[in-house]
């Protein structure tokens, strides 16, 4: 699947904001305020909750615009940058320390798992542009896929249905459905059995 640019800060933030482009914000004021409110909510109402309170955390994510299917298990140490860009089918799991940086919509299929300490990065900067604008991509994390502990998925990389990104692996490219990937950069090591 081709990378889909969803957001480019150069199209949203006028150059008159700051003479030095590195000092320009990446997002409009309204978006920054919304994220600040969410960060406070996460700190006060999400993070301190007991581990089994998955329904409560799903409620908070929905309150901030997330689309959550039934039985999603987002643990208290999980971080979601923009709940309003989170789209989950049923039984999606994000472990403690998992971080979902989603300035653009990020979709998770049924039973997708993001394990402890994994990082999904939905944006980068256009380093060839003198203004160094932030560019965010839509991303798809397929049904029954597993992003193992401490692994990393780079901007715009899509994870196919049933694909596994092994422990500590790093990918900047799409992962094929039902493939098992390992290493940095991640390479396919085998096919996963599926029924």
Image (cartoon, grey):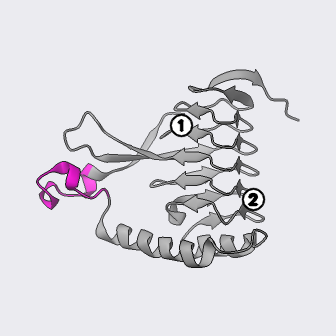
Residue 145: horizontal and vertical position, in percent?
72, 42
Q: Earlier in the sequence, mark 2 or mark 1?
A: 2
Q: Nearer the viewer, residue 106 or 185?
A: 185
Q: Tell me the quadrant of the picture where the C terminus can be found.
A: top right
Q: Look at mark 2 in the image and give the residue it sits on.
A: 90
What element does badge 2 sit on? loop
Left or right relative to 32: residue 164: right
Q: Quadrant of residue 179?
A: top right
Q: Which mark is residue 157?
A: 1
Residue 176: horizontal and vertical position, in percent?
66, 29
Count of residue discs:
2
Q: Which residues are magenta?
A: 10-26
Please determine whether, in this image, residue 52 is positioned above or below residue 16.
Answer: below
Residue 76 painted magenta: no
Residue 20 painted magenta: yes
Seen at 22% across and 56% down, the residue is 24
Seen at 64% across and 62% down, the residue is 77
> How crowded is the residue under tag 1: few (<14 C-alpha within 10 Å), some, or many (20+)?
many
């Amino acid at each position: 699947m081709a990378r889909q640019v969803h957001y480019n800060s150069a199209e949203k933030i006028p150059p008159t904001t700051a003479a030095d482009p590195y000092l320009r914000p990446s997002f409009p004021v309204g978006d920054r305020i919304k994220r600040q409110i969410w960060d406070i909510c996460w700190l006060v109402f999400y993070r301190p909750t007991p581990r089994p309170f998955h329904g409560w955390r799903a409620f908070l994510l929905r309150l901030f615009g997330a689309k959550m299917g039934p039985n999603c298990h987002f643990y208290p140490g999980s971080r979601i940058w923009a709940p309003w860009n989170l789209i989950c089918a049923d039984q999606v799991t994000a472990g403690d320390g998992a971080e979902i940086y989603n300035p653009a919509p990020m979709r998770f299929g049924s039973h997708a798992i993001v394990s402890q300490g994994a990082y999904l990065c939905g944006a980068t900067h256009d380093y060839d542009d003198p203004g160094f604008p932030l560019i965010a991509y839509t991303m798809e994390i397929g049904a029954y896929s597993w992003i193992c502990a401490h692994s990393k998925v780079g901007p715009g990389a899509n994870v196919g249905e049933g694909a596994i990104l092994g422990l500590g692996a790093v990918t900047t490219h799409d992962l094929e459905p039902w493939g098992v990937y390992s290493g940095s950069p991640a390479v396919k090591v085998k096919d996963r059995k599926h029924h």
